[in-house]
Image: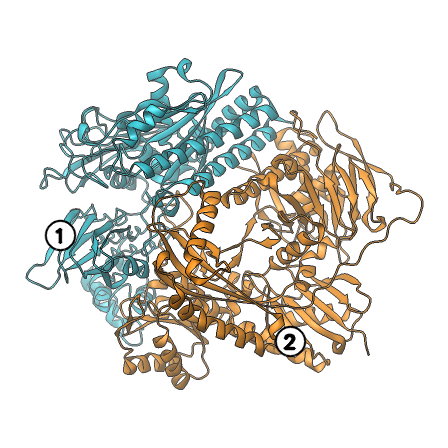
Amino acid sequence: MSDTITTEIIRHGLLAGAEEMARNLCRTAYNTVVYEIHDYGIGIHDAAGDVVADAPGIAVFTRGNDHGIKEAINFLGKAKMLPGDVFLLNYPYWSSAHTLDPLVFAPVHVDGQIIAFASCRIHVLDLKQKDPGYVLDSTDMYQEGLFFPATKLYREGEPNEDIFNIVRYNSRLPERTIGDLQAQVSACFTGVRRTQEIAAKYGTSTLVKAMEAINDHGERLARLALAKLPNGTWTAHDFMDSDGIDLDRLVKMNVTVTVTDSEMVIDWTGSARDVRGPINLPVGQTEAFCSLIFKSLTTPDTSVVAGNFRPLRVITEPGSVMHAVPPMPTFTLWTALIGGEVVLKALAQGMPELVPACSGGDVCSMMGLGINPRNGEAWLEATNEAVGFGGHAGGDGSDGIMHLTEPGCRNNPVEVLETKSPMFIESYGYRPDSGGAGRHRGGVGVGRVYRFTAPSIGICLVYKTKTKPWAIDGGREGDNNHVILNPGTDREVVQGGSYNHMGTGDVLVNNTGGGGGYGDPLLREPSRVAHDVRNGFVTVQAAESEYGVVVDPSSFLVDGPATDVRRSALR
Amino acid sequence: MNRTSRIAIDVGGTFTDVVEWSSDTGELTFDKVPTTPDEPTTGVLAAFEVTSAALDQVTMFTHGTTLGLNALLTRTGARMAVIGTLGFRDVYLLGRTDRRPMYSLTYKPPTALFERYDTFEVPERSLFDGSVYRPLDMEAAGAVAATVAERGYDSVAVAFLHSYANPDHELQMRDILAKAAPDVVVSLSHELSREYREYERTSTAVLDAYVKPIVRRYLTALQDRLADGGFAGQFLMTRSGGGAMTATAAREQPVSLILSGPAGGVIGAAAFARLIGQPNLITIDMGGTSLDASLIVDNKPVLHQGAEFESLPINTPSLYIHTIGAGGGSIAWLDGAGALQVGPQSAGAAPGPASYGRGGTRATFTDAALAVGYMEAGTPLGGRLTLDADLAIGAIEPLAAELGLVPLELARGIVRISTTKIMGAVRAITVEVGRDPKDFALLSFGGGGGLVALDVARELGIGLVVVPPGQGAFSAFGMLMADVQHDFSRTAVIPLAELDETMLSASYGPMTDQATAVLTSEGFDATEQVLIRSVDVRYSGQEHTVTVPIPDVPSNDIPAAIEKEFTDLHERQYGHGMDDPIELTTMRLRATGLVEKPTLPRMASRAGGALVSAGWRPVYLSADEPAVPYALYSREELFAGDEIAGPAVIAEHTATTVIHIGDHMSVGEHGEMVITVAALNPAGKA
C-alpha cells in the first residue's frame, strides 16, 4: 500500500478514534454543558504533543491541548510517563485555560515508547475557586481554586485515590466533579486503545510516519492558502470593557499582524499590562484563539491538525493581559472571546475583501439563579445569545447567530426557561436596525426580555458593550451589546457585564449587537433595502436616513425619484 | 378471483423497487422499474404493472415516497406563512442559533423556507402549566387571517408558546383561518408534537405545512388512478417513526413522510432479526449517494427524539438512522495538497460513476470496486445499465498518475478509505447508545453494502455478517412488515415521585381514547390494537432524557419500577448513575394496529450434486497480492445449506457480496447468506 493511501486510512482511523472519544465523553459526563453545547476539546496527538486528529468541540479551544501536553512534558519529562498513566493539568499558565477547564491526557505507549497522546478538556463544576459557578473578580491565582500541575490521576491503569480524595474533600460539588474527571479519563483510555490498535495493525513506524505526513499535509494546505493572502503589516486595537476590578478602566488589546508568503505573525505587543482582575489570558489560550482565526482564514474545511499552524507565530509580552504570568488572575477568560476579532480588524485594513466586518462580538451570556417559589428549590438557568455577523465582500452578515468562538452553542428555549425558573419571557427576536448599514449590511442582533416573578440573581456575562462593532470600507458601525434593567422606569440602567439582584417584577433586557456594515450604504441596491424593510430588519426611517432609500411602508416598493433626491442630499 | 396480493413500492432516487407477496402461494417476488421524478404517479403505476396481480386483487399497498424530502431539498414546497405568539414571531427563523461549520467567518445558513415577511404574531399567551395568561385576541387574529388570505399563501403553520400544555388558542386560530382563508392548508404545532421547546415544535409544524399541499395532490392523484384500476385495498405509507400510517393519516401529517426513505429497510431488519434469531443487528444500506446505518436492539428498531433534515428539526419519534456520505457514487479526488479523499460529493445517479457510461468522468467508489475485481464488467445493475471497466480505469488513471501509483493500487485505496470511514461512523452510532459493535451482527443490504460489509465487520470485531435475500429491494420487503403506528405524547415536567394514578389517567385517558378511536376508524378491531406506554425521564437538572416503558405493575409501584429501569438504562447509556431526584418530562403512547405479516418462504436444499463455482476472477488486494483468485458464484444458484469458503465473489441481480480469505458463508433456511468473519490478523489482511 502506498504511503499516501496508508496515511489517509490512518488519518480516518485516528479521526474515528477522536470521534469515539467525544461520543464516549458526551455519554458519560455529568455536566450538561459538555453534551449540550459540546464545550470540550479532544485530540489525539503525536509524541511531541502536536494534534493529528481532533473531534469538533468548542472553537475557542482550537489546538489548546497541545500547549498543555508540551508544558507537562517539559515539567515531568517523558521518562516519568508510564503506560496506563493519566495526567490532570489545570495550572492555567500551562494548561491554556482556567482552573475549571482541566486538561486530562494520557500517553500512548507501544513497546515501552511513547508514540502519541490522547487528550480531553472539559469544563468541570467546582475545584474550590473562590465563588461557586464562575469567578469575575479574583485578584490573584490563589483565589481561583486547586491547581494540579500535571498530576497523575491514574498510575499505570489504577486510579490515584489520593488525588480523587483531595478533589472529594475540596470541591463544593464533589460527586459531579469527580464524575466528569472520570468521563475524561475514560475518553482518554478510548483514544489510547484505538491508537494502539492502529499501531498494531499497520506497524508503529508506519503510524509514526503517517502522523508526520498528516501534519506535513496540514501545513501544505495552510501554506497554499496563506500564499493567496495579501502581504503586509497592519495594527489595530479594541478594548475589554473592564477587568472586573477597575470598572472604569478600558483594557487595551493591541495587535500587529504581519502576513508574508511564509508566515502570519500575530503580535500582541502594546496590550494592557498590570491588569488586576481575572481577564488576563494564559498564553496557550491566546495561541488557541489566534489559531481559531488563522484556521478560519486558511483551512476552514478540514479537521484541525497541528501542521495547519506551523506558518502561524503568536507573540505576546509576559505580564500583559495576553500572557499572564503567576500569580496573575486568569479566571474569566472572556478576553479570548473578544480578541479574535481584533486580529480581523487589523487584517481588514489589508484584505477588506477577505474578512467580514466585526460581529456583535460576544456570546452574551445571561445566567439567572435563585430559589424557585414553586417548589422551594434552588434553580439556575443560563443561555448564550446570538449576535449579528459583520457584512463582507460576498454579502450581508447573517442575522442572529452564535458568535464565532462558540459556533455549536445553542440558545435556551423560552419554554424551557419558563418551565424551570421563575422567569417570564416578554419577547425574543431580532432587533431591527441593529446591523450596521452598508452596501452589505451587518446582521441584526437579538433581544430577549426577562421579567422575574420572584427575587433572583441575574448575571450578565456580556462584554464589548463600550465599543461598537466596526465596519469596513465606508460601512456603518453596528449597535453594541447592552443590558437594560427596568427600561422605561426611573430605575432604568443601561450596562454590560454585571451581577444584578432582581426583585419580583423587575425586567432585564439582554440586547445583543449587530454586525458592522461593509461598503457605502448609499451604494446598496434600493431593492435590497426595500427587501430588508419588508422583512423588518431595517425600518422605513433607517432606510431613508442610513441608506437614502425611500420605501413605501405598506407596499414596500421603492420610490425611485425620492430615493435619487435623498441619496444626492446624503452624498 | 381468490388469489390476493400485498404489494410494497419503494420509490428511490433512480429506481423504484416493488415487492409482491402472494397470499395463496406465500411467494415473494421482487422487481424494479425506473423512477419518474417529473410524474411521480407514473412510475408507481408502472411498478404495479410489473407485478402479477391485477389492481383489484391487491388487498394492501404499502408505499414509500421521497416526494416530501425532494420538495425540501429543492425548496419547491408550499408558499407558506407561520403564525406565532406576540413578541415571538422570530422563533422559527432564529432557531437555536447554532451551526455546524466551526471555522466559517461568513457563515450563511441554508436557504430559508420563507421570509420574515411571512411570519405573523397574534396577541395571546399560555403558560407552561397550561393556564391562559392572555386570551387570544380574536380581532387581531382575524386581521392576521385576512392578511394570510389576501396574500394567497398555500399553507400556514400555527405555533403558539406552550401550546403543548394548552392547545386551545391554536385550535381557535384554525377556526378563524377556516373562516377567513378557507383554501389555506393549516398545520397546528400541538397536533404534531405535544412537547416543549418552541423552535423544534414550530419547525415540525412548518415542515408539515411546507410539504402538505404537494403530498395531498400526489396522494389524491394516485388514489384516483388506483381506484380507476379497481384497487379497493388498504393504502399505507411508511413513516419516519417506524411502522406505517394510512394514506388518510399521511394527508394530515405528511411531516412523518419526510424522513421515511430508509425506514422500510430498518423495519424489515427488525422483522428479519427475529426470523434469523439475531436480536441485535447493525444495518448498513449502501446506495448510490450515501450509506444509511441503523441499529436493531432486542428485535426492535432504536428510536430517538431529535431527528432533523439538514438542520431542520422534526420533533416526532424517529428511527435512529444515520446517513454517511459514502455511496457507490462517492467521488475520489485530490485536495490542494495532494491527499486522496473519497466523498462526500457524489456523482449520484446522473451522470453516475464513470463505469455507468452516462458521461461521468470522475472516479467513484463503484469504479474502484469494479477495477479491483469486486464486480464484473457487464454486470447488469437494474434496467439496462451495465458496467464498463475501461471507463472505470480511464477515470482512475489521471488520479493515479498524479500520485505516482498504478491505477489498481489507487482503486484499492479508494475502497479501503471508504471502508475506514464507514467503520468509524458505525462505531460512533453504536457507542453513542452505550453499545459495543462486537455484540451485534451486521446486516448488509442495498446495492453496495456487500462490497464493504466483511471488511467493516472485521475492523469492528463483529463476528457475523448477514445478507438477506432480495437485498437490492430489502427496503420494499420491509414495508410489507410494517404495522400501522401512531405516536402520542404529552409534556409534563414533574418529579417522578409525584406520578400517581390521577396523573396517569389524566394524561393517558385522553391519549388512549384518541388512539383507540383512530385505530378503530382505520379498521383494526380490539384484538389487533396494541398500546404501549412509556415516559421520558431524567435526573433533575439534566437536559437529556431516557425513554422508559411503563411497567405493568400496580400504579402505586410504578414510580419505583420506573426509577429502577431508568437507573439501569442510564448506567448503560451514560456509564454511571446519580443521586439526584428523577424527573419525568414526557408521557408517550405508541398505538399499533397489527397487520398480517408475510412469512418468508423457506428455501429448498440442494437436491443433489455440489455447488460449483462459475470460475474465478483476479482481485487486486495490494502490490504484493495483485491478482488473488476469488471464486465466482451466482446467488440465484444457491440453495439452503450451501457453503462457500472465501475468497469469493457472490453476484446477484443488482448486488454483489465479496467475502475474503478465512470468511465462510452458509445459506440459511430462508435464503439469507450468513457469513462468519475471519478475525483480523495484525497485518490488517484477513
Instruction: Determine which residue is flagged by label 1.
Output: A501
Q: Are marks 2 and 1 on the same chain?
A: no
Secondary structure beneath dot 1 equals: strand
Residue at the top extreme, as displayed = A79
Furthest-left residue in view? A490
Q: Tell me the element at label 2.
A: helix
Quarter occupied by the N terminus of chain A: top right
| Residue in the image at 33% along x and 28% along y | A164
Position of B40 with respect to B425 (left or right) is: right
Chain that is cyan in the image: A
- The residue type indicated by label 1 comes to His
**Is A51 left or right of A133, judged from the image as shown?**
right
Q: Mark 2: which amino acid?
A: Leu
Q: Could you tell me if residue B489 is visible in this image?
A: yes
Task: Give percent across and percent down for residue A406.
Answer: 34, 44
Chain letter belonging to callout 1: A
Q: Where is residue B615? Give x, y as percent.
A: 87, 39
Question: What is the quadrant of residue A248 in the picture?
Answer: top left
Question: At x 24% / y 65%, what residue is drawn?
Answer: A543
* View extreme (bottom): residue: B179
Mark 2–mark 1 Cα distance, whole angstroms, equals 63 Å
Q: Quadrant of the C terminus of chain A?
A: bottom left
Q: Is residue A551 above or below residue A222?
A: below
Q: Position of residue B191 (x, y in %)?
A: 44, 71
Q: Position of residue B425 (x, y in %)?
A: 55, 42
Q: Can the viewer see residue B336 in this picture?
A: no
Say few, some or many: other residues with alpha carbon within 10 Å of mark 2 (under 14 / 14 to 19 / 20 or more): some
Q: Are marks 2 and 1 in contact (CB under 8 Å)?
A: no
Q: Give the residue pinned by disc 2.
A: B222
